[in-house]
């Protein structure tokens, strides 16, 4: 980019209107700006999570001791299931970028294949999340013995057996908000797949739409990378 | 060199046009990086959970604190690979990268501010009257 500073650029080419100074189409740029605003929303949730955790540090449970279930076994294995979910989402990100690459080359057949795999990955992730929520809401076998002799099982928005109430609240809020993003991403991907199969982009002559939803899908993966670190690892 | 940008001129494909061969090695390279970094993170957390290091409680507490910074560092590394490689931000103009990067400055300030606020709320919140406490029965208070 160093050489571009020495180029003579007329004001019309730069900011005079009717030009694209960023060398990026308006649709893609607006998708980036939408993602910036969405990043602010997710940051607000995660930063509030950090502040609340700091404020309730004495009552905050160790997430590794809470999310330690795995389907098909009663063994407690911390982090294994959520690692699987991370792997699924990274994998679906890879298939998405392969679909974008195929679209760039106008390869309709491969766009269809990779889009289908991306949708499959998104659905698998949502299924995993549903299972994880069920485990969290159901709670452990023994539950928590309360002072009045009764027992509390699992988590709700009002209380949970693991510790601070805000731990459960924020889990539902943050992973729920992320899950709704994955869900809308899957819906958009399905619509796109139908459009690709019907040859809409072939007639249009380019697959830029795949790049735009690809940006959205990678962003959802990106958010999960942060949720994974701040909610499960730390 | 003209600065005009026309996506459609550059990327138009007509039915029957030859399809260029796929060059996907960089996608898989980034995939392996993401996978290895995630595996390292999970392994560290797993070993720390079971205290594989075999250290006393005080040292274990310090290691846990230190690992938090390791996780954040590795997370930012992964985020960088996703944004710059998979979302193709490295192919955009520097000015566009900086337009989006402004967000990082705002968020860094916000993170430091809010962590500090949370810490002080923890230290001083017993000075608040009961109705201002998060959970007067003991869930969130002292």
Image (tube, helix red, strand yellow):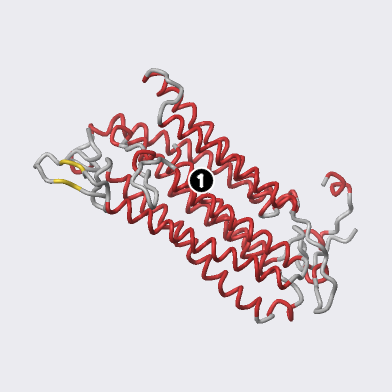
Chain of the residue under label 1:
A
- Of helix, strand and loop, which one carries label 1? helix
A86 shown above or below A163:
below
Q: In which quadrant is the C terminus of chain A drawn?
A: top left
Q: Is residue B57 above or below residue B35?
A: above
Whether residue B5 sits left or right of residue A38 in the image: it is: right
User: Of residues B76 and A123, which is closer to you in this image?
Assistant: A123
Instruction: Report x, y in % for residue B94.
Output: 74, 48
In this figure, what is the number of numbered marks? Answer: 1
Quarter where residue A102 is shown: bottom right
Q: Quadrant of residue A198?
A: bottom right
Q: Is residue A192 left or right of residue A61?
A: right
Instruction: Please name whichever residue, A75 or A225, is drawn nearer the observer in this view of the structure.
Output: A75
A91 on left or right of A199: left
Residue at the spot 50% in from the left edge and 67% down from the top edge: A184
Disc 1 crowd, CA 10 A, few/some/many (<14, 14-19, 20+):
many
**Residue at 39% in and 39% down:** A64
Q: Position of residue A134 (x, y in %)?
A: 33, 56
Query: Which residue position is annotated with label 1?
Result: A226
Q: Position of residue B21 (x, y in %)?
A: 82, 63
Residue A71: horizontal and vertical position, in percent? 39, 52
Q: Residue furthest left?
A: A148
Q: Is residue B35 left or right of residue A128?
A: right
When the figure is inspected, residue B35 is found, relative to residue A21, above or below; the finding is above
- Which residue is more in the foreground, A4 or A46? A46
At a point 49% along the width and 29% down the height, the residue shown is B67
């Amino acid at each position: 980019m160093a050489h571009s500073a020495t180029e003579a650029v007329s004001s019309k080419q730069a900011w005079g209107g009717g030009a694209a100074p960023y060398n990026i189409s308006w649709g893609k740029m607006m998708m980036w700006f939408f993602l910036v605003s969405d990043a602010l929303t997710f940051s607000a949730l995660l930063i509030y999570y950090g502040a609340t955790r700091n404020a309730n540090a004495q009552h905050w449970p160790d997430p590794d001791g809470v999310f330690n279930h795995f389907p098909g076994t009663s063994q407690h294995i911390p982090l294994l299931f959520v690692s699987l979910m991370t792997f699924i989402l990274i994998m679906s990100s890879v298939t998405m970028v392969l679909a974008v690459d195929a679209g760039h080359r106008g390869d309709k057949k491969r766009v269809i294949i990779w889009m289908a795999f991306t949708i499959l990955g998104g659905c698998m992730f949502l299924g995993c999340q549903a299972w994880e929520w069920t485990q969290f809401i159901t709670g452990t076998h023994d539950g928590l013995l309360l002072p009045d002799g009764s027992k509390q099982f699992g988590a709700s928005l009002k209380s949970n057996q693991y510790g601070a109430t805000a731990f459960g609240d924020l889990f539902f809020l943050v992973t729920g908000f992320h899950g709704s993003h994955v869900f809308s991403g899957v819906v958009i991907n399905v619509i796109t797949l139908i459009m690709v199969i019907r040859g809409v982009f072939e007639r249009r002559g380019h697959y830029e739409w795949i790049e735009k939803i690809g940006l959205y899908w990678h962003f959802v993966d990106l958010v999960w990378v942060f949720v994974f670190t701040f909610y499960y690892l730390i | 060199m003209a600065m005009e940008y026309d996506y459609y001129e550059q990327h138009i494909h007509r039915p029957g046009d030859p399809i260029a061969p796929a060059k996907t090695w960089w996608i898989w390279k980034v995939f392996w990086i993401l996978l290895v970094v995630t595996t390292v993170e999970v392994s560290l957390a797993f070993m720390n959970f079971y205290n594989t290091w075999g250290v006393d409680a005080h040292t274990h507490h310090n290691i846990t604190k230190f690992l938090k910074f390791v996780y954040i560092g590795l997370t930012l590394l992964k985020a960088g690979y996703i944004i710059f490689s998979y979302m193709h931000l490295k192919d955009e103009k520097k000015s566009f990268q900086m337009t989006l990067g402004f967000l990082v400055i705002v968020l860094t300030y916000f993170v430091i501010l809010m962590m500090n606020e949370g810490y002080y709320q923890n230290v001083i919140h017993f000075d608040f009257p009961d109705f201002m406490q998060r959970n007067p029965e003991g869930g969130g208070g002292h």
